[in-house]
Image (tube, rainbow, N blue to C red):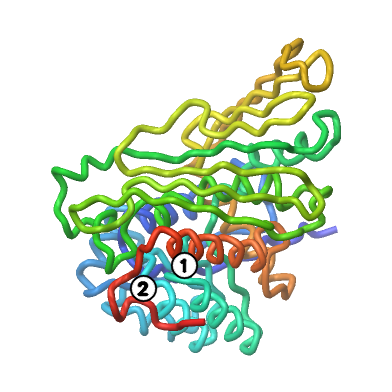
Amino acid sequence: MAAVQPLVFRWGIISTGFIAEAFVKDLRVDPKTRDVHDVVHVVAAVGSRSVEKAQTFIDKHAAGDTSIKTYGSYAEVYADPNVDAVYIGTPHTYHYENARDALLAGKHVLCEKATTSNAAELRALLKLAKERNLFFMEALWTRFHPLTKEVKRIAEEGSLGDPVVLHADLSGDFDIDNIPKTHRILDPHLGGGALLDLGPYPMIWAVLALYEHPSNKRALPTGITGAMLKTPLKGVDSSTSFTLNFTEHLRAQAILSCSITLPPPNPGVIIRYRNGNILINPPIYCPKSFIVQYFDKPGSGVVVREEKRVFSYVGGGWHFEADEVARCVREGKLESEIWGHDKSLLLMDVFDEVRRQGDYKFPEGVEKVFA
């Protein structure tokens, strides 16, 4: 019996920034190193503001691969018949227009987090993707890591009980007093501040541990409370905290925070149950280890057993989401069952509400669609 040939999945890359660099490097990692045998990724095209910039990107990050097409515009990538799906790595506030144009050109889309500037833009993209029968997914890479899947398994197998409180923080000291005011983290025209840039990562753990938990029955948060501390430099949020209550079926709370003026805490995520804890080490966007603590009896806090899980793989961790996109497209799916549209909408709805409560309004013209 002949071996089944793997699917060769061809990517068009939009943007030549750091995230696109990391994604392309991972696409070029041999899938067999992560025990993947049904999919092979190919970088087919790269689009930038000029052909020269695209070529420099390929020379530096794709070993000068001459099979990769270079384009001086994104539109040419969307029009390339040899591109199966487009990866969008531009700043948040360009995602809506870039993804819309890709969908209109008939391309499947993997769009970096946060997917859009607001939830209305995301809903418009999802409507368009459905009308065009195209796959669309937010590139929240953390959800596809082997470690994350193991945390989910342990969280749901029952020995810890239902989740009660989750604490999660992603912070990073961007040295904001000494970087250009045009830096993406400070520029409100680019969706600057902690919330959209860092906030998806505390949120992903709340989604996994609370929203996805079988006892929650996919109920949305029943309460959202947010607070922002803004920097006078450009008026974006330098520190933001937000709390989500899940009370329709669970009795659970997620306490989440992010900051651009502090290093991350350790552990970065603590998921607390009456029978124990799960402690996830930073960086919480790509953790390599976590600890499970078991109590001697419910509610005692006396740890009688600890188990540490450590994970390693070749590459940075972006290839796992790429595998998911290729498989979904092969199977004719319009969304991922692992990170579906409902979860991306939950993130954007929460972020809209936290920005509303924090009185953080983007400059006029940034948001292209309103509710």
Task: For mark 2, give the secondary structure.
Answer: helix
Query: Which residue is painted at 77% across and 58% down in the image?
Result: 218
Q: Position of residue 310 (x, y in %)?
A: 61, 26
- Look at mark 2 in the image and give the residue it sits on: 94
Is residue 334 at least partly visible in the picture?
A: yes
Query: Which residue is painted at 41% across and 33% down in the image?
Result: 264
For this rendering, which residue is in front, 33 or 344?
A: 344
Q: Where is residue 255 in the image (x, y as percent from the top left)?
A: 56, 42
Q: In which quarter of the image is residue 220?
A: bottom right
Query: Which residue is painted at 64% across and 61% down in the image?
Result: 343
Label 2 with label 1: CB-CB less than 8 Å: no
Q: Is residue 76 above or below residue 266?
A: below
For this rendering, which residue is in front, 149 or 316?
A: 149
Task: For mark 1, give the secondary structure.
Answer: strand
Residue 87: assigned label: 1
Query: Mark 2, residues whose alpha carbon is within 10 Å: few (<14), some, or many (≥20)?
Result: many
Q: Tell me the amino acid under the disc marked 2.
A: Tyr
Q: Is residue 170 left or right of residue 290?
A: left
Q: Position of residue 27 (x, y in %)?
A: 49, 55
What is the total number of numbered labels drawn onto the structure image?
Answer: 2
Is residue 63 at least partly visible in the picture?
A: no
Q: Position of residue 146 (x, y in %)?
A: 65, 40
First in sequence: mark 2 or mark 1?
Answer: 1
Query: Mark 1, residues whose alpha carbon is within 10 Å: few (<14), some, or many (≥20)?
Result: many
Q: In which quarter of the image is residue 71?
A: bottom left
Query: Which residue is painted at 53% across and 65% down in the image?
Result: 348
